[in-house]
Image (cartoon, rainbow, N blue to C red):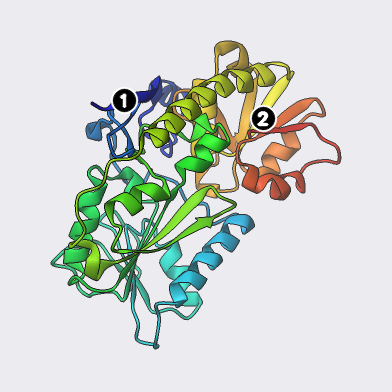
Amino acid sequence: MDKILYKSSSLPAMQNVLFANKEDALSSPRADLSLVMDPTGFVFNAAFDPDLVQYNVDYQNDQGYSDAFKKHLLDVIQLCRQFCLNPSSLVVDVGCGKGGFVDLMRLQGINAVGYDNTYEGNSLYIRKSFFNEDAHEYGDLLTLRHVLEHVQNPWVFIRELAVANGKKGFLYVEVPDLHWILKNHAYYDLFHEHVNYFCAEDFARCFSDALCSTFSLFNGQYLGIILDLSLVLDCNDPIIAPQSYHKYLVSSFNSLREHEIIAYDKALSCNNLVIWGGASKGVVFAAKAPKNVSDKFLFAIDINPNKAHKFMPLSGVEVLQPQQGLELLKPDDTVMIVNPNYEEEIVSCLPHDHPYQVLR
């Protein structure tokens, strides 16, 4: 029987869809989170409702405007180069979104194309379709960056990718690392939109013969996996996790819940709060805040210009670009940095000795 690890209600159905006005944001769809682990130790959201998750042009999750994140992408590209044995070697980015990673790979001299049925641009290198058995080409390497956590039945999906790529080549998977979330008590990284929460052990238990390498990326926030697609279909069903692993998950989620209360108590000590980060972490932090904390929110700041003057779901907090936000910032306004990976980048923009907190 699957064991419940963590429950939360009234989360944004989609944390990366912002709204043109505050009224629509406040009345945006709500969803529940019920994280359970199955006998293999795999954690997923049993309350996921696919009808509430619709990806379109309003979906904004591009982090490529940050120098810190660009460095991460360049690190990933160096991993990809290992599979480009000659100039014609092809990298296929599955679920490429707005195509930014494909563009960056090509700028770095890698022969890359992308597949995404929701793509709305006009790049010659992006296919506006799913990558499946009817795909235009096979890749020496498939990249699957921050897609698998959104997919129901992820192990079946990986097997389908192996078939779609002619049962050959390699697959690079990048997902948030559940170990990092638990170690850092990052309750704001638990979303309805993410169906699955992965650890390296999950891939080892499911694809032991096909697993080539695992990587810790982006200061531990992300997990990178390399699978040999020629061996994926030969792998057996996932093995049962040891009881000690189950106990670790239960204990870690208990600690996370306790830290969630502490984080809002700490925010309560501030006069006014400005959230720096209008993406997933900031959206969830704002949406889950008790009223005595949310009353302190002035606005949020985000470097992505596509989020400017839009409003976060459920909380209704307006997002401003850095220049405008910094102009409005008063000396006693505490800046809440919601992602520690961007602390140095953000603090360098703040006035000297300006008060700030980092969600850790």
Say if 38 sits above or below 145 in the image. Answer: above
Q: Is residue 290 visible?
A: yes
Give the image location of residue 227, x and y in percent.
Answer: 33, 64
Which residue is disc 2 drawn over? Answer: 274
Which residue is disc 1 drawn over? Answer: 3
Count residues near mark 2 (Cα–Cα under 10 Å), then give few for <14, some for 14-19, many for 20+. many
Mark 2 secondary-structure assignment? strand
| Residue at mark 1 to residue at mark 2: CA–CA distance | 37 Å
Mark 1 secondary-structure assignment? strand
Q: Amino acid at mark 1?
A: Lys
Which residue is rendered at x = 21% and y = 69% of the image? Answer: 165
Give the image location of residue 140, x and y in percent.
Answer: 31, 76
Observer-nearest of 83 and 88: 83
For marks 1 and 2 on the same chain, the one whose residue lies earlier in the sequence: 1
Q: Amino acid at mark 2?
A: Val
Q: Is residue 218 left or right of residue 241?
A: right
